[in-house]
Amino acid sequence: MPTKDLRDWIAELERAGEVTGVKGANTTEEIGGIVDIYMRKMGQPAVLFDEIPGYPKGHRVLANILTSIPRCAIALGQPANTTDRELIQWWRKYMGDKPSIPPRQVNGGPLLENVYEGEKVDITKIPTPKWHEGDGGPFIGTACLVIMKDPDSDWVNAGCYRIQVHGKDVAGLMMSPGKHGRLIMTKYHERGLPCPVAVVTGMHPALFMLAGLEVPYGKSEYDMAGGILGEGVEVINMPKTGLPVPANAEIAFEGFIAPGDTIMEGPLGEWTGYYSGEARPEPAIRIATFMHRNNPILVGAIPGVPPNDNTFYFGTYRCGAVWNQLEAAGIPGVQGVWAHEAGGSRFWLTVSIKQMYGGHSKQAGMVAASCHAGAFNNRWVVVVDDDIDPSNINDVIWAMCTRVDAREDLEIIKGGWSSALDPMCYDYDGDRRNTRTIVDACIPWSRIKTFPKVARNSKELESKVREKFAKFMPRSG
Ligand SMILES: Cc1cc2nc3c(=O)[nH]c(=O)nc-3n(C[C@H](O)[C@H](O)[C@H](O)COP(=O)(O)O)c2cc1C
Ligand SMILES: [Mn+2]
């Protein structure tokens, strides 16, 4: 059995009613325009575009991929009816176990169905949308793997960094400082050597998820993805660079980044919902080989006004990481964590606790706002009691409306860990910081026994009527 690929995931989405089709939308603005609408409201299916004007029928684009709990769950090998709470527990366990299985070399695969070299390379054959009107051009790499090998060891890194199409055999690559790809590229360039690189799009989403997460320096994302899939990813080596790419991926190309070879790159709307400036010079990939499956599917994970593709998969991962770190810091009674989708999974965290002592809720809020997984770009932390579902924004707002006394319950922390992507960050001489607010929306500890009674089902009545009248229950909630 070949390892699971993108098409297996799409087939599972079809069975779960998690994907819809759109025909006839163009790449210049219509696909992006439609994806923007689908992303805005949670609970919408993924969208598979076909019959794209100017391209052969069957050359498709898949977007709005990981903006639902069922789609994330299926990608991680879990049932479609997994709840957000269960998914967070899955990540917590995953972070503890860190399963890892190395890739397996194979001799061929569907990716080799169409191979072009030299003059014949033309990546513009792939329908590549301009995702938002203000973008600097079409981006073929959003949900992608950028593969590089450390020149000093066997380490193969696969990071997700955006790739802009600049012509039939040129692409731009944007890697922020500190990213593994950038560190590896710098090693080649410091030795005066071109950096070999391969780009893959349209692989099983578990690979994309790992490529977008902070896998430690020196560890291959391929091994980690194998751990999720339960078997080593089948790979073939690209002919010029020898870099391994999944044998059943949809689209791949390889090439070289010469020292000092840059091209004006960007902008692309960011996960914060804003642009961060104008086009800038970034490394150029000169493409030597381009290959794709028959009827290739380009996959997009589009940043933009959240909720977006970062929100759910990254958000549920972050919830697990913050939960683990709260417990590691000695906070008892954590019942739930939610990195709200509208906050791009970083700006807003809700933590639910079972209060056990005075000061417990403030302590939980301070740790959530400062622990490694929660601190970067955070702006709001709301701590709620255990009767509040942290992923239900109505519940959270109700708690904020009825359990907060601003004189006591708001803490403002200045000089927090931030970045230029936060439009409200401020500068200490180029050192980007932000202000964050902790809202203690728990019932005051001193009033916990006398606080007005909540007018809602007891747990007992709730489960009794849910069971007896199961077929009359609303679809969700
Ligand atoms: C959809 C998506 C797009 C991303 N785009 C970029 C990007 O263009 N540049 C970048 O430096 N990081 C980007 N990131 C973040 C990196 O993928 C992430 O930091 C990852 O850990 C990088 O891999 P590395 O740890 O091997 O460097 C993106 C993440 C996602 C999920
Ligand atoms: Mn890495």
Image (tube, rainbow, N blue to C red):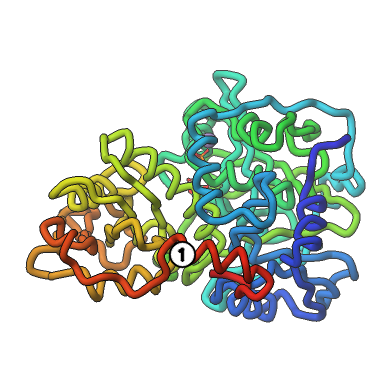
Please identify the quadrant where the N terminus is shown.
Answer: top right
Residue at left offset 15%, top offset 56%: 445
Q: Amino acid at mark 1?
A: Glu
Res 457 → quadrant: bottom left
- Please tell me whether mark 1 sits on a helix, a strand or a loop: helix
Which is more toward the observer, 439 or 225? 439
Where's residue 280, x and y in %?
Answer: 46, 59
Q: Name the residue rendered at 57%, 23% in the picture.
A: 151
Q: Which residue is mark 1?
A: 341
Report x, y in % for residue 429.
Answer: 17, 54
Residue at (79, 73) in percent of width and height? 21
Q: Specify whether residue 165 is in view.
A: no
Residue 244 shows in this picture? yes
Write the residue at 85% across / 52% down: 120
Depth check, front residue: 19 or 82: 82
Query: Where does the image place residue 349, in percent across and percent down from the top left?
Result: 34, 57
Where is residue 467? Give x, y as percent.
61, 63
